[in-house]
Image (cartoon, grey):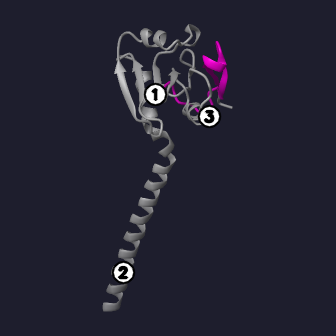
Amino acid sequence: MKPIKTLLAFTLAAALSLGLASFGAVSMAHADDHSSIADHGTMHVTKSPTCGCCGAWVALAREEGYDIDVTDTRDVTSVKLDNEVPGTMWSCHTAMIDGYVVEGHVPFAALAKLLEERPEIDGIAVPGMPGGSPGMGDDPTARYEVLAFGGDAGEGEVFYEAGL
């Protein structure tokens, strides 16, 4: 009977060790996935304190691994004007990250593309509040355009097409 107890104890210890080791590997892999995000610093988001869809976008950005600093204000217009976001591209919230303006419900794949490619533009925008965009239902099949503005993009050009 003693060999069975020893074998059982060894098996449980081995299973526990393997489980903890794989848990650590998963955590490390997750950290590696977001290591480049940390290189871009804190994203500063200016939004209305009563806007639920803006809060949903911020929550999704945090889930993606972004460090977020939120400024709630009733005057969201001034940050758009100060950062020269074209009026035709306005949305409900404005973010700043690593020298770029991010206007509205921009999908995180477009944001990653911006930060990776570093084009000579002022920022990107999703005009209005398209259904299915992050914070507006978060449907990956929703189709809408992310526009670039300023710098090489001038008054605006398509930067990314969501849902394709």
Residue 138 falls within the magenta-colored stretch: yes
Region rendered in magenta: 135-161
Mark 2 lies on residue: 10
Mark 3 lies on residue: 117
Residue 117 screen position, x and y as percent: 62, 34
Viewer-nearest of discs 3 and 2 = 3
Viewer-nearest of discs 1 and 3 = 3
Q: Is residue 91 left or right of residue 152?
A: left
10 Å crowding of disc 2: few (<14), some (14-19), many (20+): few
Label 3 SS: helix
Label 2 SS: helix
Residue 58 screen position, x and y as percent: 42, 29
What is the CA distance from the residue labelled 3 to the residue labelled 2? Answer: 51 Å
Disc 3 marks which amino acid?
Glu
Which residue appears at 36% of the width and 25% of the height?
A: 70
10 Å crowding of disc 3: few (<14), some (14-19), many (20+): few
Which residue appears at 49% of the width and 30% of the height?
A: 98
Disc 2 marks which amino acid?
Phe
